[in-house]
Structure formats: C-alpha cells, structure tokens
Image: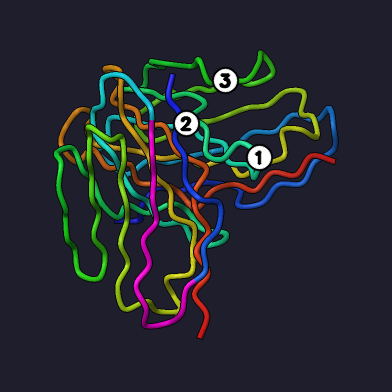
Amino acid sequence: DAGVIQSPRHEVTEMGQEVTLRCKPISGHDYLFWYRQTMMRGLELLIYFNNNVPIDDSGMPEDRFSAKMPNASFSTLKIQPSEPRDSAVYFCASSDSLGARTDTQYFGPGTRLTVL
Amino acid sequence: GQNIDQPTEMTATEGAIVQINCTYQTSGFNGLFWYQQHAGEAPTFLSYNVLDGLEEKGRFSSFLSRSKGYSYLLLKELQMKDSASYLCAVKSGGSYIPTFGRGTSLIVHP
C-alpha cells in the first residue's frame, strides 16, 4: 500500500495568494482528517470527513479555510487568501474506522507551508 | 474540553531506559494513543490503551491509570534512532477523534 499521499510536500507563497493542498487517503479508508501542526499549538484537527461528507469542521480557523472531498480517493484543503500566520505543516490522515479498539490514524508526509 | 500535559523535552543515553509521562484532565475517557514523530516526518502509531495496566510491545511499553488521568511510555535499550517527538493523544467525551498533546522531544545521545 502506498500510504496516505500528500502534495505538494513544500509550498512557499506570498501573503494574499490562494493555496491548495491535496490528499489521497489509503484505499478503503472511510475517514479522512486534516491537521495543522505548529510549534506553538502542536497538532490541531481542522476538519474530518466520513464517506466523503464533512462531519466536524469546528477546528477550521476561519472562513479563509475550506476543505472538500469530491470522492473517496481525493481531498483538498484550500486557504484563500493566505496569511503569514497560516505557515505550518499540514497533515492529512486516514482511518478505516472510529470507535474501534484500535482506530489508528495513518498520517501522510505533510505539506510544509510558508506564507511570506 | 481536554487538557493534556507532557514534558517538552527529555534527554537520555543510548542503551538506557526512559519514561515519558502524560497527564490529562477530561470527561468520558475513551482511550489513549502514543505516536512517534521523527523530525520532518509524519506521526506513526506506537500504542493504544483503554484499560488500566501495562501494554508491552518489544522495547516500548505503555501504561495507563484512568483513575489518576495518567499514562507513560517506557522505552528500553534506547537507540539513537529513538530520538523523536512522542505525542500523547486522548479520546474522550463521546468523541472518537483523539486530541493530541504538544509532544515530548526525546534526544538520545551516545
């Protein structure tokens, strides 16, 4: 299995530009999660999907952030317009269950975003 | 809400044993995870505890006391490659989504 795939691995952009991060979950996994990691705040859940439907987006910081999952094998996280404080590592993770004894999340390699 | 506390950084010597503690305050505890994250890489699953006691897996063990809101990760026979951040994550309040602590950066030196 290829694992969770994210692209790009690194993104450097200027303030005000639109940024789109992409994720392909592990085949067969019904749950997809977007996280943001910074030194100050650690690993924070932004949003998660179940069977392509957004379930909880309470972690999305503001309206500049949006996420979609048009099908079971693809999701995007978009920031428009981007700001320097959005600089972080963004992780996508997937899981084949929730509530089971070992509902492990499998993380992608992350996208390191720098907004200048 | 939840409050998860871990030491920010620890150092240890190759071949030694180290214990990384995690304390939490939460309602409706539902399970606790430990993840390992090497610098510049993704978190990877290490262990899961939902009942009190010790779970052993090779050189790594994880302990849970639900009444004390306390867990630890025990790493034996430390190797240089164990230098990483160790994240404690807690499920609670009917949610199946774990909340992550800030992580403990472990530095193993020769």
Magenta stretch: includes residue A105: no
Q: Report the number of discs.
A: 3
Indicate whether A47 appears above or below B75.
Answer: above
Label 2 environment density (alpha carbons within 10 Å; few <14, some 14–19, many ≥20): many
Residue under label 1, please give it: A40
Q: Which mark is residue A22?
A: none
Chain bearing tag 2 is: A
Foreground mark, 1 or 3? 1
Whether B22 is among the magenta residues is: yes
Front-lying residue, A79 or B105: B105
Real-space Cα separation, disc 2 to disc 1, in angstroms? 26 Å
Q: In the rendered structure, which disc, 3 or 2, sits on the residue that comes first in sequence?
A: 3
Q: Chain of mark 3?
A: A
Kind of residue sitting beneath label 1: Met
Amino acid type of the residue tagged 2 in the rendering: Ser
* Left or right relative to B100: residue B17: left
Q: Secondary structure at mark 3?
A: loop
Q: Is residue A91 left or right of residue A63?
A: left
Q: Which residue does the image show at 23% across and 60% down from the upper left?
A: B61
Q: According to the image, label 3 marks what residue?
A: A60
Q: Are marks 1 and 3 on the same chain?
A: yes
Q: Residues within 10 Å of mark 1 (few under 14, many from 20)?
A: few
- SS for callout 2: strand
Give A28 or B78, whichever is nearer the viewer.
B78
Q: Earlier in the sequence, mark 1 or mark 3?
A: 1
Q: Helix or strand or loop: what does disc 1 sit on?
A: loop
Residue position for label 2: A75
Foreground tag (2 vs 1) = 1
Disc 3 versus disc 2: nearer the observer = 3
Residue B76's spot in the image, x, y percent? Answer: 30, 72
Query: Above or below — where is A18 with respect to B104?
Result: above
The residue segment tinted magenta is B12-24
